[in-house]
Image (tube, rainbow, N blue to C red):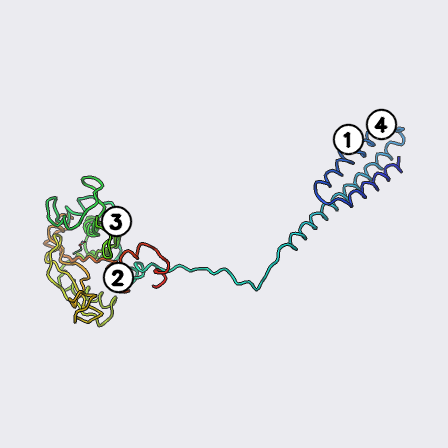
Amino acid sequence: MKEQLEAILAKAKEELSAVQSARELGDVRVKYLGKKGELTTIRKGLRDVAPEDRPAMGQLINDVCAQLETALAAQSEEIERKALEAKLAGETLDVTMPGKPLTIGKKHPLNVVLDEFKEIFLGLGFSIAEGPEVELDHYNFEALNIPKDHPARDTQDTFYISDNVVLRTQTSPMQVRTMEKKKPPIRIIAPGRVYRSDAVDATHSPLFHQIEGLVVDKDIRMSDLKGILELFAKKLYGEDTVVRFRPHHFPFTEPSAEMDIQCYRCHGAGCPLCKGEGWIEILGCGMVHPKVLEMSGIDSTEYSGYAFGIGLERMVMGRFKIDDIRLFYENDVRFLHQF
Ligand code: DAH
C-alpha cells in the first residue's frame, strides 16, 4: 500500500506541474482528494486493513494527503504569480507622458463685483440680509407704498404666482422685512435675484440681480446717503469718479433720486457708451418714506432712514465693458475665463 500511495503522490505532482489555471488545479484536487478521489478511495479501504496495521497506514495516508495539499497550494500561488506577471507585462507605464490638463474654475463676474461690493459695505459697518424670492404682494408692493392701483406697478412687469404672491420684482421688500424684525440702528445690504416679465434682449433679462441698501437711525439725512454712495462709487469705479444726483420718484422714498456717474469712457463729453449723455445711471435712492417706516412698525417722528437699490448686472457690464446681459447666464467658459 505504501508504494501505491507514493506512486499516486508522484503522479499527482506530475499532473500538478502541468497545470496552468485555477480550474485545472481544481480538477486535480477533485481527482485525488474529492469524494471519489483516488486518495479518498484508499482511505475508505482502510477498514479492510488488519487492525494492528491501521494506525500506521492511516498516518501514511494523512501524510500523503498533506503533501498533496502543500503542492496544490504552492502551484496555486505560482499560477497567481504568473497571472500577475502577465498582467503587468501587458501594462506599460510611460512616465514621460504629459498629464491631463485640469481646468480650474473662476469666480463668475457677477460674484467678482458682488464680493467687492460686500467688502466695501461690510467695511462701513453694514451687515448682509437675505430674503425670499417668492414674495408676498404685501412686501413687494403694498408695504412699500405701492397700493394695488398704483401706476408704479406697471413699470415692473410682475410674475404672479397667485393673487397675493409674486416673484419679487425688486430687493426693496427686504427693507420692510428687516425693519419688521430689527429695531434701529439698522444698516444692511440685501443682494439677491429679482424677476420681471421682460422680453430677453442685450440689456433685459427676466431674471437679474439687485442689491438693496437700508440705513435707519436717529438723525439720518440725505447728506449721509450722498456721502456713502459717492464713497462707494469711488471705491468701485476709481477715486477720480464723478457722481451726480438727479431728482426722481419712487413711491417708497421721499425725496427720491437717481445717482449717475460721469461716463468713464468719454469723461462727460458724450460717446456711444453713455448714449451721448456724458453720464451713466447707476442706482435709485432716497430717504425712506415716513409711511413705509410706519407700516414697518418704526416711529417716523423718532427715526429716519435712507435706502438705495442697484442693478448688479448693469454695474458689472459697466465695470468690465460687457455689452450683452445674456453672456452672464450662458456660462460659456470662454467668456467666464476673462475675469
Ligand atoms: N427698487 C427700485 C427698482 O427696482 C430701486 C430702488 C430705488 C431701490 C430707490 C431703493 C430706492 O431702495 O430707495 O427700480
Residue drawn 22% across and 41% down? Answer: 161
- Identify the secondary structure beneath mark 1: loop
Task: Give the residue pinned by disc 4.
Answer: 47
Say which label, 1 or 3, has the lower sequence index: 1
The answer to whether the residue bearing label 3 lies less than 8 angstroms from the nearest atom of ligand 1 is no
* Disc with the residue nearer the chain's start (1 vs 4): 1
Q: Residues within 10 Å of mark 1 (few under 14, many from 20)?
A: few
In space, the residues marked 3 and 4 are separated at their CA atoms by 91 Å
Give the labeled residue for mark 1. 36
Give residue 131's mark. Answer: 3
Q: Residues within 10 Å of mark 4 (few under 14, many from 20)?
A: few
Q: Earlier in the sequence, mark 2 or mark 3?
A: 3
Q: Which amino acid, by three-letter code, is at mark 1?
A: Lys
Q: Amino acid at mark 3?
A: Gly
Contact between marks 1 and 3 (CB within 8 A): the answer is: no
Query: Measured from the top left, where is residue 46 in percent x and y?
Result: 85, 30
Instruction: Tally the marks.
Output: 4
Judged from the image, the secondary structure of the residue bearing numbered disc 3 is loop
Amino acid found under the numbered disc labelled 4: Arg
Cα separation, mark 1 vs mark 3, equals 80 Å
Disc 2 designates what residue?
323
Q: Which of 158/332 is in front?
A: 332
